[in-house]
Amino acid sequence: MRRKHVVAQTVSLFAVAAALAGCTVDGNAVNDSDPAANAVVDVKSLDTGKYPTEPRKPFGEATGDEVVTYDAQRMAQYIVAPFEIDADLTNMGLPMQVLYSTTNVRAVVGDDVANVKANDAILYGYVVSASTPDETIRAGTKRELNNFVTRYITPADATAAANQMADAYLKRPKATTVRVDGMSGSRVISVPGNTNGTTALVSITAHNTYVLFTYYQTTDAQKDQLQPAIKKAVDLQTALIDQFPATPTKAEREARNQPKKQLIMDQNHILIYALPYTDQEIKDAKVKTPNPGNVRAVYGPRSMSFFSSDPPADFRLLNEVGSTANAMDRATVYRAKTPEGAKKIMDTFENSNRARGMKPVPAPPNLPAARCLSEVTQNVTGYWCEVSYGRYVAELVGTDPKDVYQQTSAQYVIFTKADQKAN
């Protein structure tokens, strides 16, 4: 999905493909009237290497640590995207991940704030970060934001955590409380920015069993944007997190007299069709994103935009074509409502990648339904391919062209066995 392409271990650059779409012949785009676009693929002729060619079995019920990971990945769709707060915040960055405990929260807020006693009751959370594009640094208008939500065992735990974190912030040099109209339920604190000539506001809000946190930084010349953006962030996040169907804890079920309900992983039946990482690769963090907790996951259009180089456009597009459940594993898989919608995704992302400088390379042998591009980053050549079948589209990335071709071929074979009516 047009993710930023960092070819060494943090490879990004999402794109997607569509069935019966224009494809590539020797790396050149062709249209539907070209025989290669609708060529019958002999799957037996494809080099799939060591990769599986069968869909995975259904994942079933989440148990143990899976519950935390899966629920936090689900929560990501209900985290306000930075561009929804400030339209210029389109340069997605780190941290962007599942928050399992205070260990992860430290990377966002620092040891003093994360280590407050009430944070022992964190169940999980999700954080997303972004800044204005790099060119704004030279123009002196750079702005940046971290936005996260953490879930706690009880509302009292969330209230205690919000107050304790705010108190910890106020112990920092030059930190002061700020009163913002319409934000009486939030603790808002002004702190020096992380570079000279910058200022930031921090908002910490307890809301039911959640703590909503936003850090927004501007240059001193843009300080008038701080309070409106912080208020907008809290208003949007409060409304959005209320829509999250969080899995009830045991205490919540007992208080509501509810029976235990199974939390079924991959409820939309799409992750089973994504070319997978092995358990060991995920355990050893040998994945193509900076955080292993971001893979073996299903995301909605908003949370998929977190990994994009053009978040607003991709958010709109995925909603438009009905790609509401998207799988991220070794392959990233999308499923539009129709093959025509998938074709639109495929064409849009290929055109965008070409426009940003990626060059066409040949498609995998005997697989005219695929399109491949490459680019050089820090003297390393990265390869990206997209492939399609019916409503399903996928993208594969890596630095070894033969390996990327094998992944793409294996993903295509899996697609030929996918349920085209699944939702």
Image (cartoon, helix red, strand yellow):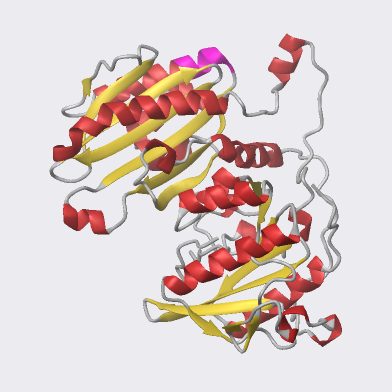
285 sits left or right of 140 in the view: right
Q: Quadrant of residue 380?
A: bottom left
> Foreground: 403 or 340?
340
153 sits left or right of 114 in the view: right
Please state the horizontal and vertical placement of residue 57, each as a whole percent of the image.
Answer: 85, 55
Tell me if residue 129 comes above or below residue 7 in the rendering.
Answer: above
- Residue at 59 percent of width and 46 percent of height: 301
- Residue at 77 percent of width and 45 percent of height: 268
Magenta region's main secondary structure? Answer: helix
Number of marks present in the image shown: 0
Of all residues shown, which one is farthest toward the front?
Answer: 33
Residue 277 appears in the picture as rendered: no
Q: What stretch is highlighted in magenta?
A: 154-159
Please state the horizontal and vertical placement of residue 76, each as a whole percent of the image.
Answer: 57, 40
Residue 157 part of the magenta-drawn span = yes
Tell me if residue 337 comes above or below residue 401 in the rendering.
Answer: above
Please state the horizontal and vertical placement of residue 9, each as a whole percent of the image.
Answer: 50, 67
Q: In which quarter of the image is residue 371?
A: bottom right
Is the N terminus in the top left, top right, bottom left or bottom right quadrant? bottom right
133 sits left or right of 407 in the view: left
